[in-house]
Image (tube, helix red, strand yellow):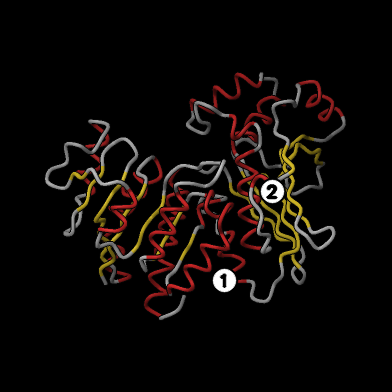
Amino acid sequence: MILRLAIIGFGNVGQELARMLLLKRPWLLRSKGLDIEVVAISTRSKGSLMSKSGLDLERVLKEIGTKGDLKGYPDSHTDLGPLDIISKTVADMVLELTTLDIESGQPATEHITKALGNGMDVVTANKGPIAFAYCELRALARSRGVRFRFEGTVMDGTPVFSLVEKTLPGIQVVGIQGILNSTSNFVLTEMTRGRTAQDAIKEAQARGIAEADPSLDIDGWDAAAKITALANVLMDARKTPKDVDRTGVRDVTPKALAAAKVNGTKIKLVASATMPDGDVRLVVKPVTVGPDSPFWSVEGTSSAITIQTDLMGELTILEKDPALTQTAYAVFSDILHIVESIRSGTL
């Protein structure tokens, strides 16, 4: 089976996925009978490529690694924007890997809408479309008979959505709690150890965890988008990040952290989805946790989520210090899930 991909957004995740596809190519051919070709790559500022016969990923990575863009790649360079590439490409599947826009989830939602409307399967690692337009995108995918997956939107490669979908049939999710933002958790951990917030943020930026502008993390917006995505998918919440009661960690002081430590507790930024009156309520705020909490030992860049269910009680998943590879793997695994669905004739 030949699977042709168009990648919209070719930053760190897209490039790591390209390396993963090269690494796993022999295994894919041998074990899955699957030949994956990348036939289009669209970037915001580094140039775009399109080729019906497939792109040389090694050459693509070399170009962007040594020159910083794709404009020197022979024969295949195009000035087409992402929507035109989606319209004109011969790809079977679109990977939407652009960065989050917390105000609206655009233009990623528009990219996905275009691809699904054109009858293409879609994988995304962008939480914006799931946080702002999940129900509409799900309905469109079903109406067009195509598949739409998004495991990498919340906890990198940790299988949160797949866990519920594939292994918990008949379960109703009645609540979700999680430490979902690596940067804020790292900052709180380092401040508890005596560092200033500014130093901790600089360290997070040096490690590539935090952006140059860390406000999405520190002010709780990233966690808000993630808990909204989780609630929309697992609890049919039909919310957006603007519905979240949100407080970040900007005002957590060393004094408060020291007092918590004296009392045998810790302060963590926890995102939650509850149903106190039948409607889903979303909250992101710093809370105090004790040694009996599943979040007690979640330190540094680690993340964790507790899913509360009607029949299985509480299930907690911990992701230990994730790296870029884990996010790329989420996209890789979603591709394979879709291939299996295609082969079995299911959605």
Q: Which mark is residue 166?
A: 1
Q: Is residue 282 left or right of residue 96?
A: right
Tell me the amino acid under the disc marked 2: Gly
Q: Callout 1 environment at 10 Å: few (<14), some (14 to 19), or many (20+)?
A: few
Marks 1 and 2, the one that precedes in the sequence: 1
| Quadrant, the N terminus | bottom left
Closer-to-camera residue (111/73):
111
Question: Disc count in the image?
Answer: 2
Closer-to-camera residue (259/343):
343
Residue located farthest toward the bottom when viewing the structure as drawn: 345
Considering only vertical position in the picture, is 255 above or below 39? above
Q: Is residue 85 left or right of residue 207?
A: left
Q: Is residue 269 left or right of residue 182?
A: right
Q: Is residue 164 left or right of residue 313?
A: left
Q: Residue at x 38, y 55 (%)?
A: 95
Assign a secondary structure to mark 2: strand
Separation of marks 1 and 2 at Cα, in angstroms: 21 Å
Q: Which mark is residue 178?
A: 2
The quadrant holding residue 307 is: bottom right
Q: Residue at x 74, y 43 (%)?
A: 245
Cβ atoms at labels 1 and 2 below 8 Å apart: no
Image coordinates of residue 148 in percent, x first then y, are: 46, 64
Considering only vertical position in the picture, is 206 above or below 141? above
